Amino acid sequence: MIVVAILLFEQGTQVLTPLAGLTGLSSHYTTETVILAPTLYSVPASNYSFVSEDLHSGSQVVGLLQVAEGLEVAFYVMNEGNFSLWRTGHPSVLVLAEPIAVSYNFTLSPSVTGTYYFVFANQDNSPRTIIFSLNSTQTVTVLSPLLQYASFELLFLGAVLSFLGLRGGKKKAKPSPMVKSGWKCKFCGALNEEHRVFCVKCDRSKS
């Protein structure tokens, strides 16, 4: 039990999250972090604009693209390497593509940590004005206090059980038989009963 407590101290009680989920000893809530607040961008006629952001793998990113006056743009998301290919006219792999975006909500989960490019392509001969925003959402699991302090509880319980085990394991010394009257050995000092001729301890004669 003490060993388990030490492991929890080292690794953190988050290793108990699967157990907490099975036993109902955890709660969940979603946090949202602003990556890019709603920002106004201008996209030139027959050209494109872009925004780049560093994203982490495993995160969930939600975004909103709104084109002014109900007009449209093409919207693409790609990583850094594919963006370099795309802007030079070479074939590229897109993480997300929306050829006709007017008011567009999207969600993506990057598979690799890195810089991602959000491209607004305007194929019309008049400029476009857009509003673009990005947020990151994350689900947080909170353990019950019963599990949050499990390492301390196990350590205390283990210490108590170990103490009781040590006390229970000690053998009580057998009391030496009481000798009401007798003689004391002049060699070893042991007390002997009167009728004994030889010492019970060193086996020497009393005379």
Image (tube, rainbow, N blue to C red):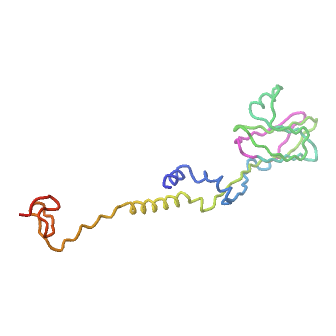
Front residue of 117/139: it is: 139
Q: Is residue 154 left or right of residue 49?
A: left
Q: Is residue 43 magenta?
A: yes
**Residue depicted at 15% across the width and 73% down the height:** 181
The boundaries of the magenta stretch are: 39-60
Tell me if residue 189 comes above or below residue 107 in the rendering.
below
Tell me if residue 97 comes above or below residue 155 in the rendering.
above
Q: Quadrant of residue 92?
A: top right
Q: Is residue 31 left or right of residue 131?
A: left
Front residue of 168/10: it is: 168
**Residue depicted at 66% across the width and 52% down the height:** 18
Residue 110 in the image, given as x and y percentages of width and height:
74, 40
**Residue depicted at 82% across the width and 38% down the height:** 96
Residue 108 in the image, given as x and y percentages of width and height:
78, 43
Which image quarter is the C terminus in? bottom left
Residue furthest to the left in view is 207
Q: Which SS does the magenta portion mostly show?
A: strand
Residue 147 in the image, given as x and y percentages of width and height:
60, 59
Q: How many marks?
A: 0
Front residue of 163/90: it is: 163
Front residue of 49/166: it is: 166
**Residue depicted at 77% across the width and 37% down the height:** 117
Q: Is residue 102 left or right of residue 87?
A: right
Q: Is residue 53 left or right of residue 19?
A: right
Q: Is residue 38 magenta?
A: no
Residue furthest to the bottom in view is 180
Residue 42 in the image, given as x and y percentages of width and height:
85, 41
Tell me if residue 188 comes above or below residue 3 in the rendering.
below
